[in-house]
Image: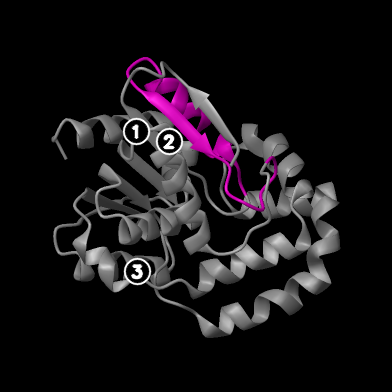
Amino acid sequence: MKIQEYGNDKKDVILLLHGGGLSWWNYRDVAKQLQDKYHIILPIIDGHAGSDRSFTTIEENASEIISFIDEHLNGSVLLIGGLSLGGQILLDMLSQRKDICSYALVESAAVIPSKLTNALIAPAFGISYGLIKNKCFAKLQFQSLHIKSELFEDYYRDTCLIKKQDMIAFLKANTSYALKKSFCEASAKIHIYVGEKETGEILRSAEEICRIHSSCRIHRLPGLRHGEFSINHATQYATAVQKIIQGEM
């Protein structure tokens, strides 16, 4: 597993898992704001630009990161955050190891499988994958994601490096993921963040997560769309992380 690190490795660890199709730079600005107080680790999810393995499953990614924490970080960390696909991996980590972290920040994670969307992914990308390296097409895709403009070159460079089979694999995993029953045993203090302009699927998923783990707390973000919190509002995200750790949220 490949990682990027910020801060002092003697301090408490915050581990942040990027969204599907993105990479560690999803959290670069957040990491810079937290690096004086914490050791920030930004893993690159399998199948993404800069990773050392093809994408297999959400469950295997979760297991791989748990093994990394066992080997390098004494078996647990202070806080884990994750966006979308990264949020699903975080949820599965909590299902596999109930005490893997003290605090969890899950952003915009889907846990209600969509059979129709899942079935359409492979044929759709079989037709459109070749357009990914077209910069005009990439700019349109980028704009549809509502990511701040200064991240376009990172997005375009890394999207071009994702293999078609990996992109299909993680998108199919993303649209078919469901929570495990063991998630209800997680001991972490779990905070769920969703933008008010998210799809109904994501909003319903937030409710489902909290139904299964009744101590979860939902934070609804006025005016925000999918992924905008961590990507576009680093200061607010870093503040939320610190307030969660300090017990102020």
Q: Position of residue 136 (x, y in %)?
A: 82, 50
Query: Residue at 21% across / 65% down in the picture?
Result: 184
Q: Position of residue 86 (x, y in %)?
A: 47, 52
Q: Earlier in the sequence, mark 1 or mark 3?
A: 3
Residue 66 versus residue 238: which sits nearer the camera?
A: 66
Q: Which residue is mark 1?
A: 236
Per the image, label 3 sits on a secondary structure element best described as helix
Q: Residues within 10 Å of mark 3 (few under 14, many from 20)?
A: many
Tell me where the magenta segment starts and ends, as one range.
Answer: 22-50
Residue 67 versus residue 245: which sits nearer the camera?
A: 67
Q: Which amino acid is tagged 2?
A: His
Q: Position of residue 167 (x, y in %)?
A: 69, 61
Q: Is residue 40 magenta?
A: yes
Q: Are marks 2 and 1 in contact (CB under 8 Å)?
A: yes
Q: In this picture, is 66 found above or below 248? A: below
Q: Which residue is mark 3?
A: 205
